[in-house]
Image: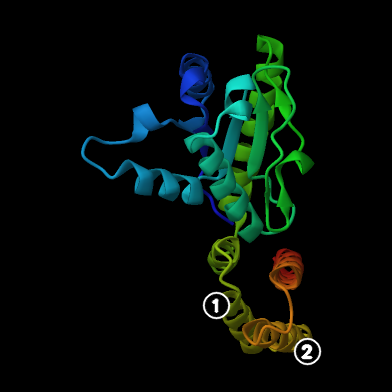
Amino acid sequence: MNWNKTIFLAHASEDKPQVRKLYKTLKENGLDPWLDEENLLPGVKWDDKIKEAIKNSRFFMACISAQSVSKNGYIQKELRLALEELERKVPDLIYFIPVLMEDVELPNITVNTIKLSDYQASKIFNNSDLQKLIIHLRKQADIIEEVKRKENPIFKNLRSVISEGKVDTALSILRKYIQERDDYMINEIVLTTAKFNNFKNQNMMGLISHEQFTLENNRVLYSMLEMIKQLEEKENHKS
């Protein structure tokens, strides 16, 4: 799991005044927002740094308004980059958060298997709405810190590798961990590895579509997370 708590604020340039206020409020509430004019250093290649920030942020907050919906500009590019990144994340990980600053429909953007409008939006039309969002974000951050304090370093590394979509590496680490402990799950990890290698080879030969490969890939990632969870429970029971 990626323990970075940064919140990337994607927005149209026309919405900058409102997003500045959002940035300040998030900061005042102990959160870690990322805003281009605050976090980009002079002289850096800003396009590369923005792509890097989207990839490395724990949350991507898409600030949606009438301007950002109708505009064909960099905001659209950021949304697509985030959806591409979301496709590589483990299932059920909260990463992409659409935030409605005005009463508008979410833009019709689809990247491979990911559709923007499938994700629940948070309205921040007033301070009460914004506080609900802040409570949700702080709760997620607290969960991250709690798990981080308790987590076995090996499992921490595994979740980090999984969150980056490095399936081969994660399978290798997990298999080694299980083999060294003669764990009953050895057959499960062997079968999972064989399954992954099979559909990876099929994808390389063009026998399955990109969508099928992504679906199977995510299933393997989810299976590994379930195995890690079982191993953690076993460790906790021993202690």
The residue under the point 64% across, 32% down is 137
Crowding near pointer 2: few (<14 within 10 Å), some, many (20+)? few
Asked which quadrant contains residue 123, the reply is top right
| Image location of residue 115, percent across then percent down | 73, 47
Three-letter code, disc 2: Asn
Q: Which of the two discs, 1 and 2, labels the residue nearer the N terminus?
A: 1
Q: Left or right? Give the position of 42 relative to 198.
A: left
Camera-nearest residue between 119 and 189: 119
The residue under the point 55% across, 69% down is 154
Q: Left or right? Give the position of 156 relative to 211.
A: left
Image quadrant holding the C terminus, namely bottom right
| Image location of residue 113, percent across then percent down | 73, 57
Three-letter code, disc 1: Thr
- Specify the label residue 169 is tagged with: 1
The answer to whether residue 117 of the structure is visible from this angle is: yes
| Image location of residue 188, percent across then percent down | 78, 84
Crowding near pointer 1: few (<14 within 10 Å), some, many (20+)? few
| Image location of residue 187, percent across then percent down | 78, 89
Residue topped by disc 2: 187
Q: Residue furthest left?
A: 43
| Callout 1: SS | helix
Camera-nearest residue between 85 and 95: 85
Camera-nearest residue between 119 and 140: 119
The residue under the point 78% across, 43% down is 118
Q: Is residue 68 above or below residue 191?
A: above
Asked which quadrant contains residue 196, the reply is bottom right
Q: Is residue 178 above or below residue 112?
A: below
Image quadrant holding the N terminus, namely bottom right
